[in-house]
Amino acid sequence: MWYYTRIALVAALFIFVFYFALDMFTSKPGYFADYHHQEKYQKCDIFIHNQKATDLANLKKRLDEFAIACDSPKNVYFSLPADDRRESIQVCDSDPDKSNASCFNFYVVKVK
């Protein structure tokens, strides 16, 4: 009897370890993991990467320029690289890391 119990415990442990090892090697980090929630703008949740003090006001100006309506819930991701030459804005109808969300991308290239 004890022999079968040990075999069952070893098998359960093997299945448990295999399951978590498989999950660890197949999961991928979130694309927007480095973006930090700032605030809500109308019904849009605003996330910013490489934040500077003027980014939030600049992003609101860009949303108006591109006629991006925040009358329904959306996630807006804003990135301004360190060289300050290209802004990128992604507007998604939900969290793209948790669902198959549709996103629109906008880029502003600054010529200096």
Image (cartoon, rainbow, N blue to C red):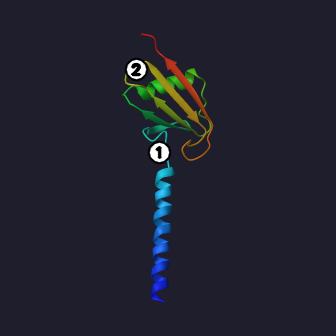
Please say if 54 is above or below 41.
Answer: above
Disc 1 residue crowd, few under 14, some 14–19, many 20+, Cα 10 Å? few
Q: Residue 65: which quarter of the image?
A: top right
Residue lying at 38% horizontally and 20% vertically, measured from the top left: 83
Residue on which disc 2 sits: 84
The kind of residue on which mark 1 rests is Pro
Q: Are marks 1 and 2 in contact (CB under 8 Å)?
A: no
Q: From the viewer's side, name the closer residue of 59 and 77.
A: 77
Image disc number at residue 29: 1
Q: Residue 37: which quarter of the image?
A: top left
Label tally: 2
Residue 72 in percent (x, y) is at 62, 38
User: Which one is in front in this view, the residue at disc 1 or the one at disc 2?
Assistant: 1
Residue lying at 46% horizontally and 38% vertically, measured from the top left: 39
Residue lying at 48% horizontally and 39% vertically, measured from the top left: 32
The kind of residue on which mark 2 rests is Asp
Horizontally, is 100 left or right of 54 in the view?
Answer: right
Residue 7 in percent (x, y) is at 48, 79
Image disc number at residue 10: none
Please say if 14 is above or below 59.
Answer: below
Residue 103 in percent (x, y) is at 60, 34
- The single residue placed furthest to the bottom in the displayed view is 1
Residue lying at 50% horizontally and 78% vertically, measured from the top left: 8
Q: CA distance from mark 1 to mark 2?
A: 26 Å
Mark 1 or mark 2: name the one nearer the start of the chain.
1
Can you say which quadrant of the picture contains the C terminus? top left
Residue 104 in percent (x, y) is at 60, 30
User: Callout 2: helix, strand or loop?
Assistant: loop
